[in-house]
Amino acid sequence: MTETTTTSSSSTSFSIRNWPSSISLGSCIGGVPIKLHLSFFLLLFLEFTSAIPHAGQFPLYMLFVVVLYGPVLMLTVLIHEFGHVFATKRLGGEVGGIELWPLGGIAICGPTDSLSGEIKVAVAGPLTHIPQMLFWWMIYLFVKYDFNMAGETTAIWPSFSIFLKTMSSGPAGFFQVLAGEAVWLNIILCGFNLCIPAYPLDG
C-alpha cells in the first residue's frame, strides 16, 4: 500500500520516526527507513496460540506457524513495499519510509508527475507477489512428495489446507507445506491489495 504526501521544506515531512505502535528496523536499500507495526506480533501470537492444541501430536506445527507468520510474511510484505518504493523513485517521486503490517504495509511516497504515475506506483506493490508466488511454487514442486500420506498422488498445485501429517513427516514434508502456504499467502495478499478499494490497501 502507498500513502502519497506532498513535498515540504520541513525536515520531518518524509519521516516515520514519530509513528506510534511500531518498532524501528533501521534502514535498507537506498537508505529507506523501515518500521514494523506491532500488529505483526499480535497476528503471530494469535496463530501461535491457535496451534497449541495440535502441539502434542504435531510439535513441528508450532515451528511452522512461527516461520510462516514471522520471517516469510515479513519478507513478503517488505518486497511488496519495495515495489512501491522502486516505482516511486523511478518516476521521480520521494520515499519517506516503510511501515510493515500483515496485509501489505505502508510506504510513504511523494507524488509523481501524473495520475498514471500514481497508478503505476499503486500497482507495483501487488505485482511483486507474482514472482514471489512463482518462487514458492518452484520450491513446492522441487520438494513435494509424489504421494501424500493417504497414498494419493500429490497435486502439482498446492492445497490451501495444511496437512499436519505431511508437514511432520520430515524436512521435505515441512517445506512442501510451508512453500504451498506461502504460494497462497502471496495470492491472498495480491488479491486483497488489488481488489479491495479500502485504505490502507492498494485497490
Image: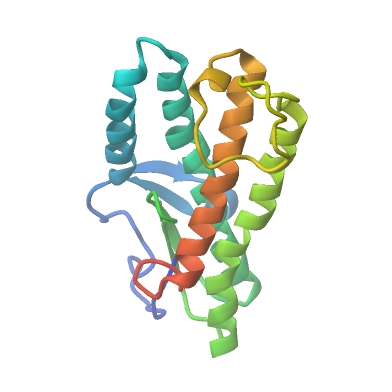
Tell me if residue 142 comes above or below residue 32 in the rendering.
above
Q: Is residue 95 visible?
A: no
* Position in image of residue 93 (x %, y %): 54, 75
Q: Nearer the viewer, residue 19 or 79?
A: 79
Left or right, 21 with respect to 3, comes to left
Residue beneath the point at 40% across and 20% down: 62
110 or 179: nearer the eye?
A: 179
Q: Looking at the rendering, in which quadrant would you find the N terminus?
A: bottom left
- Pinpoint residue 140: horizontal percent, then vertical percent: 69, 34
Q: How is the image coloured?
A: rainbow
Q: Quadrant of residue 30?
A: bottom right
Residue sticking out furthest to the left? 20
Q: How many marks?
A: 0
- Image position of 3 with respect to 34: above or below: below
Q: Is residue 129 left or right of residue 69?
A: right
The vertical placement of 73 against 200, above or below, is above
Q: Position of residue 28 (x, y in %)?
A: 54, 47
Q: Quick one: which residue is furthest to the top in this view?
A: 56
**Is 167 positioned to the left or the right of 157 in the image?**
left
Seen at 28% across and 35% down, the residue is 46
Seen as rendered, the residue at the extreme bottom is 114
| Residue lying at 69% horizontally and 42% vertically, measured from the top left | 137
Residue 83 in sight from this viewpoint: yes
Camera-side residue: 170 or 130? 170
Residue at the spot x=56%, y=51% of the render?
186
